[in-house]
Amino acid sequence: MEDSKRSAISVETIVNAPVEKAWESWTNPEHCMQWCHASDDWHAPYADNDLQVGGKFKTTMAAKDGSVSFDFEGVYTDVDHHKLLKYEMADGRKVSVEFYDQGDTTKVVEIFDPESQNPIEMQRGGWQAILDNYKKYTELGS
């Protein structure tokens, strides 16, 4: 199937934290390194974030046993503080992350263009696992 025919994938969670804390946990590289992995045998040993339109971010995701790693990176195309992040990944795919202020909780919705090498459900599952780690980390006190 051609990439242009593949629908965007959406994952979401509700974080039991106000939007200011949810935003800080997502955008601060020191926090990102604590939650940006899909399983416990991976980690994020490096993160950098220039949070502005045209700014770049990079998070290194690596297997803890050192067998493999990759850089997840992109350039911001829209930044609306405490509300919205949009970026284009290095491979040209687009992502949006919306933060919905619900008082003591924050709904986070992440929508991303799929890649063509892995099944949609596998991609959704991986991104949801990372989002679940973000929720858990943020709620524990980041």
Image (tube, rainbow, N blue to C red):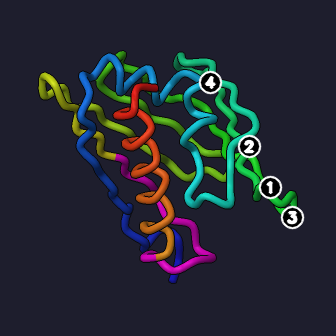
- SS type, badge 2: strand
Farthest bottom residue?
1
Q: Tell me which segment is drawn in magenta.
A: 110-121
Coordinates of residue 23 in the picture (x, y in percent): 39, 24
The residue carrying mark 4 is 30
Write down the residue under mark 3: 67
* Amino acid beneath label 1: Ser
Badge 3 element: loop
Residue type, numbered disc 3: Ser
Q: CA distance from mark 4 to mark 1?
A: 19 Å
* Front in this rendered view, residue 110 or 105: 105
| Distance of label 3 from label 1 (alpha carbons) | 7 Å
- Please give left or right for residue 24 compared with residue 10 in the image: right
Q: Which residue is mark 1?
A: 69
85 is within the stretch colored magenta: no
Counting residues from the start of the chain, the first of labels 2 and 4 encountered is 4
Q: Is residue 88 above or below residue 126?
A: above
Pointer 2 residue: 60
Q: Going by the image, does 52 lie left or right of 85?
A: right
Q: Residue furthest front?
A: 140
